[in-house]
Amino acid sequence: MAMCVEDRISSFPDPILCHILSFLPIKEAVRTSIISTKWRYLFASISTIKFDGYSMSGLTDRNIDNFKNFVDRLLKSPDQVRLDCFRLSHEICSWNDGDHDFDISGWICAALCRGVKEIDLQLSYLEDILPAVLFTCGSLVTLKLDAVGHKFKFPSDVCLGNLKTLHFRDSFFGDYSILRLISNCHVLEDLAFIECDFYNTSVLNIQTPSLKRFILDFDLGEFGDLKYVVVINAPNLIYFQCTDAVAQGYTLSTMKSLEKAHISICNCDTIDSQTIATHLIQVCNVRSLRLTINEIFRTSKLPIFHNLIEFEFLGRGFNGREIWLVEFLHRMPNLKTLTLNFPVVAGTQWKALEVPSCLSFHLKEIEISRFNTHMIDMEVSISNL
């Protein structure tokens, strides 16, 4: 005799079931409609709508229009719940051609009308797709745009009063409207420019007192030298990441709250560029610093890092340059954790590297990786290890 298994999940209130469905890919969420009458239309009330490669798998020329109509009904039907997240990935662009013509702009507007909190667009072509209302939406808390070469220009009335997270990737900014956008995000806490370029711009001026996390990660191989000055006034910054080929100059405000910084600098092979780069490294209030460089800086121009307790160094070859490293470590009197991570060219011979005596009072841990021990002759005398 078959045992009757009680369906406890179906007894949950609809809001809880919809919340559970929000964690599923949209394709799987729709499939739950066959469970029972109760589940038949629950998927239409989920608060997270994401269309990625998995959602698009299995589409053909014969059923692509059915998919388009399904998305239209899902987003644009009346009496729908508020949206927490709306996401589109690159795969949808491969089907958005003259034969099918997805109404992506209309989908974005529909999500905005439903009070969406997060929009994440990973699209290879955004020309005439992004509606102007996207940049005046009061409900948005998170906006992520992966535009793959899109040249952004923002409307004059741009204002995102509740936006806390703003990320751009693979984008171009040719005027100062991006600075107007940032200045009109009054509660912005997380800002990222990843593999972006600011052409026809002489100053990248970030003036955001509320900012807590800032990533400035350039595509160094593609864009080469940076022709502008970077100004950052973010006194409440907690995390700062910069991957740079040395701009024309840096002006950084005092970052009293800074806890962690990740700085990577390349193409720094002249005295002028090294002098400019020292202004970027002078995040002297930081507690944890990860530094990647391929050239030596004059340590006499660097400050004393009194608050620094964690330091990770990543270099690209250090033949005969251990003296510079020791001098740099002398500027970290309260260091507790030291990580050295760099490849050594075959034949490199390290001379005796004596850890600065100022580290003996606090240093607890040393990690050295990515080179062979037979190349090293190191003298370490630290009582706290």
Image (cartoon, rainbow, N blue to C red):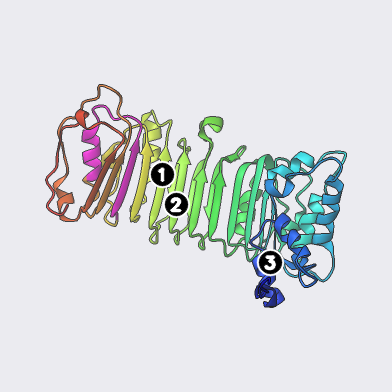
Tag shown at residue 119? none
Residue beneath the point at 76% across and 56% down: 108
- Marks 2/1 in contact by CB < 8 Å: the verdict is yes
Q: Secondary structure at mark 3?
A: loop
Residue 60 shown left or right of residue 144 in the figure = right
- Residue 263 — which label? 1
Q: Quadrant of the N terminus?
A: bottom right
Q: Nearer the viewer, residue 203 or 165?
A: 165
- Res. 233 in view: yes
Q: Which residues are magenta?
A: 308-329
**Crowdedness near tag 3: few (<14), some (14–19) or many (≥20) residues, C-alpha within 10 Å:** some
Q: Position of residue 336 (x, y in %)?
A: 24, 54
- Mark with earlier residue (2, 1): 2
Q: Upstream in the sequence, badge 3 or badge 2?
A: 3
Q: In front: 215, or 6? A: 6
Q: Which residue is mark 2?
A: 240
Q: Is residue 79 left or right of residue 361?
A: right
- Residue with the mark numbered 3: 139
Give the farthest residue toward the front: 1
Q: Position of residue 337 (x, y in %)?
A: 26, 51
Task: Give the structural element (helix, strand or loop) at label 2.
Answer: strand
Can you say whether 346 is above or below 342 in the image?
A: above
Write the residue at 21% across / 34% down.
323
- Left or right: where 349 falls relative to 19: left
1 or 3: tag closer to the N-terminus? 3
Q: Position of residue 98 (x, y in %)?
A: 86, 38
**Spatial distance from mark 2 to mark 1, Cα to Cα?**
8 Å
- Label 2 crowd (10 A; few <14 / some 14-19 / many >=20): many
Residue 157 visible from this viewpoint: no
* 311 part of magenta stretch: yes
CA gap, disc 3 to disc 2? 27 Å
